[in-house]
Amino acid sequence: MTEERKQLFLRDYLSKLRPTNGARDLVERLRDDGFRLVVATSSSGDELDQLLRQAEVDDLIEQATSSSDAESSKPDPDIIQAALKKGKLRPQEAVMLGDTPYDIEAAARAGVPTIALCCGGWWDDASLAAGL
């Protein structure tokens, strides 16, 4: 079922995705301000590369972790911890930019402060329930 969902997403939906307005500007600004950019996604590795291209930020990201780098998916903190390890960062040296309650909860459980981006279609009360 997971593989079928992935193939359906890649075949029918990925090409229709568009970057959130200002997303590239934000990522460029973070990079220019000296932040090391490490993605922590529950997507698979082959989805990750395509998602970053579709978001038009693939050339800005230093490192990335995907579902293959973690035992459990968000809201478990595994993928955040894998990103910290890959980026050689301690939780207090990182900030999570997240657009789902799962991101917020996973970062909190990993001890990483979060900036919630309200662009992923989640209601504010769902984010609040996650600890925002």
Image: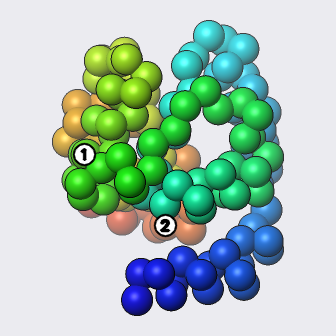
Q: Badge 2, how many Cα within 10 Å: few under 14, some, many 20+?
A: few
SS assignment at label 2: loop
Q: Earlier in the sequence, mark 1 or mark 2?
A: 1
Q: Position of residue 126 (x, y in %)?
A: 36, 65
Q: Position of residue 74 (x, y in %)?
A: 31, 57
SS assignment at label 1: loop
Which circle, 1 or 2, is nearer the viewer? 1
Considering the image in quadrants, where does the N terminus appear?
A: bottom left
Q: Which mark is residue 77?
A: 1
Residue 9 found in image quarter: bottom right
Three-letter amino acid code of the residue under disc 2:
Trp
Residue 62 found in image quarter: top right
Three-letter amino acid code of the residue under disc 1:
Pro
Q: Is residue 93 shown above or below 22? A: above
Q: Is residue 50 shown above or below 80? A: below
Residue 128 found in image quarter: bottom left
Q: Is residue 113 left or right of residue 19?
A: left
Query: How far apart, in angstroms, are the residues tagged by discs 1 and 2?
Result: 20 Å
Write the residue at 72% across / 14% down. Answer: 32
